[in-house]
Image (tube, coloured by chain):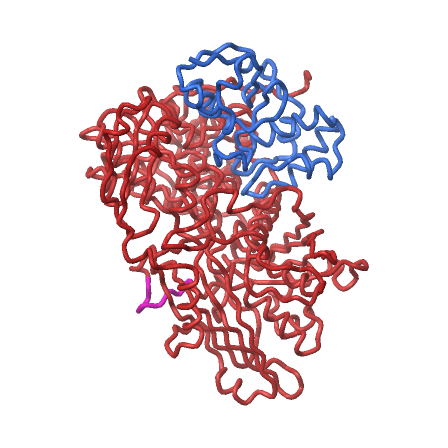
Chain colours: A blue, B red
Amino acid sequence: MASLNVNGKPYQADVDPRTPLLWVLRDSLGLTGTKYGCGIAQCGACTVHIDGVATRSCSVPVNMVSGKKITTIEGLAVNNVMTKVQKAWLDNEVPQCGYCQSGMIMAVSALLKDRPKPTDADIDAALTNICRCGTYQQIRQAIHAAAKA
Amino acid sequence: MNDMPKFDLPKFDRRSFLVGAAAATGGFSLGFNYMPDALAADATPEVNAWVVVKPDDTVVIRIARSEMGQGSLTGLAQMVAEELECDWSKVTWEYPTPGTNVARKRVWGNYNSTGSQSIRQSQEYVRKGGAIAREMLIQAAANEWKVPAGECTAANSVITHKGSRRKTTFGKVASAAGKLDPPKDVKLKDPKDWKLIGKPVKRLDTVDKLTGKQVYGIDIKLPGMVIAAIHDCPVNGGKLTSFDADKVKSMRGVKSVVRVSDSSVAVVADTFWNAKTALAALPKTWDLGENAKVSSATIADMLKEGLSADQAFVGNKTGDAPAALQGAAKKYEAVYSFPYLHHATMEPMNTTALYTADKCEVWCPTQNGEGALAAVAEAAGLPVDKCDVYKVHLGGGFGRRARTDYVTQAVKIAKEMPGTPVKLIWTREEDMTHCAYHPVTQCKMTGGFDAAGNLTALHMRISGQSILASLLPQALQNGMDPAVFQGLTPSAPEGNFGYTIPNVLIDHAMRNTHILAGFWRGVNLNHNAVYVESFMDELAKEAGQDPLEFRRKMLKPKHRAVLDAAAAKANYGKAPKGVFQGVAQIMGFGSYVAAVADVTVSPEGQLKILRIVGATDCGYAVNPAQIERQIAGSFVYGLTAMLYGECTVKDGAIEQTNFDSYNMMRIDEMPKVECIIMPSGGFWGGVGEPTIAVAAPAVLNAIFAATGKRIRDLPLMNHSLKSV
């Protein structure tokens, strides 16, 4: 039995302790906003925050996160009010298919906490998530917009 | 924070999918919730097949084509709404199921979302659908007022009687309108009168993609559902000879081990992780068969032979190119190649199926709703009217989801456990290694000049794989695959060769392998453009001319216009010191496209693509904001392939298994993209694919300008640009 704190709520999940956090979130907790893309921490679609740090949940066994605070895309907003990153994504119409965008938004939200006014070089270095639709130009615009908001 | 948009709490139940997952989405933009049981399909009768207007004036537009990011859902809704004269702020949408389409004599037409066709090949009937609904709404109001319909007008969801100035809304008369006979014919607006078509309105489906609420196929959850992982033989044509289910049956969460086909086995469990873990532990033996002898090297040898083979299918013949080349004052030749590519949709293949003895229902991400329905019926062994497919948004399609192999598998597994919903999810590794790949080709280009340095003859010999031979052999024409000549035909409106040269021969030596070739976004246009546009640069150099000027003299007007526009915006010829430019143009999917790339290459060989300007003439531009995104995204797709894309074959199997061995461009390599949308009117071209084809040749030509190195074999990662 794994104990987790996700989006401020305690959960118990009856899973093998080696199960990646991603699949506990998706299949046990029903939080499907966090996406499976590669399973090997390459694409970033599964990015969540663990104690505030952007982390690829496909490669973190669930027994490593007990006692830590996990935030997923579903828990980013408070009282259903969008964060400035989500708002910038909406205003700049970033998503195409949208599948990678949960991970992008989680990665960028963590980046902006560390660097509230990131340069293009900061963005290039920090954001290694894959988007196959090719929304990178809109993502860059939205990051700068969120930093100004 | 108070000015931040609020959004609905995630809600998720099966019923919402039965009537169209989509309608719930629109609730946000309207600022209120739809309860699933209040959805249009349940509560409100339609005006006609395309339009439902609810009593509160909400307009639900039915969308038959699939949404996979390309934005055509919004464009199609714009076209219906343009003629309907409704209030755009009250528009939402839903997917009618393919089964309903069949039951209603295909009232929504074609469901295919491939070949950049969603808008251009449904534009007329969806506009008519909106116009007919408008006429019916007006007629219903006129009947109520007992006045001639001709004295009434509709605008912004309000119907007005001119004489009496009486007004009513669509929502008030929709119920009566739906009972009227539709008019037999309606006149569509002149394009100059469009108010909504041509406007960069916001997409109708953004919000849920920002909050985790958007439901993709992989997210489907049904009561009592189990999850399956599958392993198919790594070599196409091989067989699964045995497996030992007893070894894994007691593993955590495992429910069942199912032989799915001659070549595949699935493990069904309570969670995907448990299914995947047990599948990996399942002892299996394969008979890889004869195809295991095939490698990239044997394929390359076979294609090389085709470059000089006597027999070839002819796609474009003008004058007598072989004779003209024989008599040319100067001849120039170059050989190119283009590798297998995988689509790599971010969402791996998946399908959820629920089978009972008399019914089979499937939830799946598909570009081919009706094809998926046919696959369900066949795999279930049930008549089509006992089956249905509930479409959901796709996490990328790129042509991969036009196939239904994963749908068939899910139904076969579900058939083994009647009454239990089964969600089949492919691992990324299964996805990478079981695809129909962008075809592999080689190409020999030969050009001939006269004594004055004019290009008088061109022979283009393509040798390689045919997509139709792999996937649709019944579509071959006397053995020929006409699609291989995409962008190269003499005059086809879908994509004709832009250069006027006195003697042209373009032919194709078909060389197929056991690796399936498939429709990969941009399709055959991708390699055809690399070959033609790289070689035009080579010929320009041979002729001692500027690459742009050399092309301009031979290009047809519309092909030249997009190239000129891109060159002007890119300040072609006036690049700063150290920055080098390359150009390319092509026509495909009914549209004219061109690109100009600005690059730098360091002495160490580090390439930086600074900027790429893309110009598109798509005839009519329905939503310029979405077209810009398609152009930018097409550059990413094309440049990713140019930089890294290559699937290689060893012992009959594809070697690349995940993003660590099949690399993708990230944001740090993204050039600045500038778009020119220049619709010249009179035709309808697609925008989701053509620009991909000019991405690579524009950059390859710029690399040549920078380094003098001519890259003829993709991808670029196999070459060094270091100066010697």
Q: Does residue B496 belong to the magenta stretch?
A: no
Q: In which quarter of the image is the C terminus of chain A?
A: top right
x and y percentages locating residue B579 in the rendered image:
76, 58
Q: Is residue B98 above or below residue B635?
A: above
Residue A7 rendering spot, x and y as whole percentages: 55, 15
Q: Residue at x 69, y 71 (%)?
A: B549
Residue displayed at 37% across by 44% down: B368
Q: Main secondary structure of the magenta part?
A: loop
Q: Is residue B478 magenta?
A: yes
Query: B207 or B547: which is nearer to us?
Result: B547
Pick the front one: B134 or B495: B495
Q: Quadrant of the N terminus of chain A?
A: top left
Q: Residue A87: name its quadrant.
A: top right
Q: In this view, does A1 lie to the left or right of B385?
A: right
Q: Quadrant of residue A29?
A: top left
Above-or-below relation of B521 to A98 = below
Residue appearing at x 41%, y 37% in the figure: B427
Residue B613 visible, this angle: yes
**Residue B80 in view:** no
Q: Is residue B450 above or below residue B129?
A: below
Magenta-drawn segment: B476-483
Residue B197 in the image, given as x and y percentages of width and height? 57, 44
